[in-house]
Image (cartoon, rainbow, N blue to C red):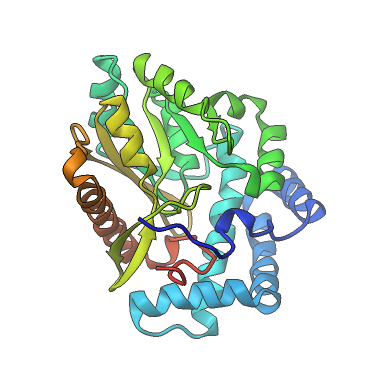
Amino acid sequence: MTSPTEDRWQDVAEKGSVLAIRLLVVLATTLGRPAARAALHLVAAWYVLFHPAVRRASRDYLVRLQRRAGLADVYRHVLCFARVTLDRLFLVRGDARSFELSFNGEAHLRALRDSRRGALLLLSHVGSFEVLRASSEARDLPVAFLGYFRNARMINAALRELNPAVDAQLIEIRPGDPSFVLEVEQRIAEGSPVGTMSDRVGFDGKSVVAPFLGTPARFPPGPYLLAAALGCPVYLVFCLYREPNRYELHCEPFAERVSLPRAARAEALAGYAARYAARLEHYCRLAPLNWFNFYDFWSRS
């Protein structure tokens, strides 16, 4: 495992402004989704034209995925992200009328609920995890979410204004304060699944290398260490966005129990990370514009 010395994704400033985000909320809540979606063309163009780091990160990913990436491809990638972010505003306030939602593998979560058994759900920045949260409420399948939320304070503040109850489902990773692990343990013990993003290296910078899109990439070992400590099953959940209003949730088993033998701990972690990266790549290829990691993902691999 390695630790980076360069800036991390957590240190990348949230793009945009409070005014722009609030304007988007006003458009979405007063004029509806079509009007807000129309405004996103300007938002996406602004990001592409004035944020070279976003352009580079998008092109770096798209070239690995499809072997070419012009400015138009980057624009479509950023526009897809903007559209998914807009849809979060509707989903977080419980308004799913504009969307077609499908859930492949819902039976796995229902079985966990019926047996009152907790699990760790490995998520990613593919599509929208907000759909999982909205679906879990509508289908009586409660899910908590573990993550570092301070790098997106503005959008999270806007979501909180729309629905203050969202905080009840969040378990925040607090650097220097490991007590969040106890919160996760409690949720798991109560039979609630806990989702956590698994395609970004954590705040501590620790990582394990796995092949992803033909190049070694760094992934966090934390989810597997946590699962091993809790002794709970692990599932993968991906949510793909399809134009113009369709979301596809996919849930699949990953490991009944994560085992990390002391004598081969590094190799075991690498194996789990490689399995996760292979499934992440599979879903990226199903929906190429759905992966939203707009930072230098491979630079320190």
237 lies left or right of 51: left
Q: Quadrant of residue 50?
A: bottom right
Q: Quadrant of residue 1?
A: bottom left
Q: Is residue 67 above or below residue 299?
A: below
Residue 249 appears anywhere in the view: no
Residue 286, x across and y down, in percent: 30, 62
x 48%, y 78%: residue:
59
Camera-side residue: 263 or 275? Answer: 263
Residue 49, x across and y down, in percent: 68, 79
x 42%, y 23%: residue:
142
Residue 295, x across and y down, in percent: 54, 66
Residue 160, x across and y down, in percent: 68, 33
x 35%, y 15%: residue:
189
Residue 126 appears anywhere in the view: yes
Q: Is residue 41 above or below residue 59?
A: above
234 lies left or right of 11: left
x 38%, y 67%: residue:
288
